[in-house]
Amino acid sequence: MIIDHLGFKVSNYEESKAFFGKALAPLGISLITEVKGWAGLGKNGKPEFWFGQGGPALGGPARCQMHVAFAAESREQVRQFHAAALEAGASDNGAPGIRAHYHPDYYGAFVIGPDGHNIEAVCHTPEA
């Protein structure tokens, strides 16, 4: 797995929530959580597909249309991703660290890529 989760803006949050809730139910995908105006759908308690009403994509700037989070195997990989992305020309959008509002071991780092998308690396395991 390389993609941990992704998210994008929608024009009508409630309509999208109803649509995806019904359309994805046969696949075993359902609403897991809602955080800061974003719906997280998935399986087995893990939200992998996110959408939110207009506004920035999961913490990105106003021009940000999409959020993609890549799965990291360790917190060190998250730190390395952040440093490499900044070196490659990205803008910082959140230094490596715990994001406890998602869960206690959520360790992520965020950058804004060349097209304005919010790109993240995330590790869900506790530090060894």
Image (cartoon, rainbow, N blue to C red):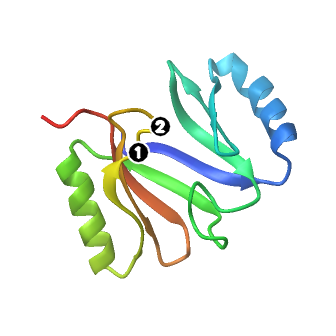
Which picture quadrant has residue 73? Answer: top left
Q: Are marks 1 and 2 in contact (CB under 8 Å)?
A: yes
116 versus 124 height, above or below: below
Which percent across, then down, holds residue 101? Answer: 48, 39
Identified by mark 1, the residue type is Arg
Q: Which mark is residue 49?
A: none
Helix, strand or loop status at disc 1: loop
Eyeballing the image, is 44 above or below 110?
A: above
Judged left or right of residue 21, residue 71 is left
> Quick check: 125 left or right of 2?
left
Q: Quadrant of residue 117?
A: bottom right
Q: How many marks?
A: 2
Local crowd size for mark 1, using a 10 Å CA cut-off: few (<14), some (14–19), many (≥20): some
Residue nearest the observer in this picture, 99 or 83? 99
Q: Which residue is mark 2?
A: 102
Give the SS element for disc 2: loop
Residue that appears at 82% across and 33% down = 19
Residue 30 place in picture, x, y as percent: 66, 23
Side of 70 where 63 appears, left or right: right
Reading the image, the residue beneath label 1 is: 99
Viewer-closest of 128 and 71: 128
Q: Position of residue 58 (x, y in %)?
A: 58, 54
Give the spatial CA distance, label 1 vs label 2: 6 Å
